[in-house]
Amino acid sequence: MAKLKWAKLSGGSEKQFTDALRVYEVQGDKLDAQYLERWVKELGVEDLWERLKDEAEVI
């Protein structure tokens, strides 16, 4: 979630977003969805989170 927050703070950094996307793609099924959803709301990155989930190709 920190990568998404940095992406937002930097005005839409594709590097930060892509880093988060790749982690999600590789680790997606091992991540705690409830924990992530809580932090998405806490950090205010709902739009980036939805984009990440839409673009992800989970391996």
Image: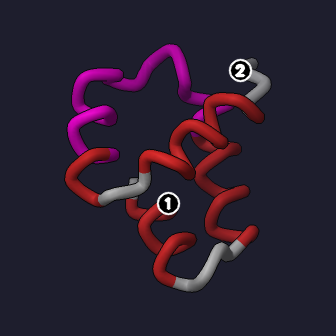
Residue type, numbered disc 2 = Val
**Quarter of the image holding residue 18?**
bottom right
What element does badge 1 sit on? helix
Q: Is residue 26 depicted above or below 14 in this figure? A: above
Q: Is residue 7 depicted above or below 33 in this figure? A: below
Residue type, numbered disc 1 = Leu
Residue range corresponding to the magenta coloring: 24-40
- Foreground residue, 39 or 30? 39
Q: Residue at x 31, y 23 (%)?
A: 32
The 10 Å Cα crowd at callout 2, few under 14, some 14 to 19, many 20 or more, is some
Q: Residue at x 66, y 45 (%)?
A: 21
Q: Is residue 34 depicted above or below 15 in this figure? A: above
State the count of labels. 2
What element does badge 2 sit on? loop
Q: CA distance from mark 2 to mark 1?
A: 18 Å
Instruction: Work out whether mark 2 precedes mark 1 in sequence or the reverse, and give the earlier one.
Output: 1
Q: Nearer the viewer, mark 2 or mark 1?
A: 1
Q: Residue at x 58, y 35 (%)?
A: 24
Q: Position of residue 23 (x, y in %)?
A: 60, 42
Q: Which label belongs to residue 4?
A: 1
Q: Which residue is mark 2?
A: 58
The secondary structure that dominates the magenta segment is helix
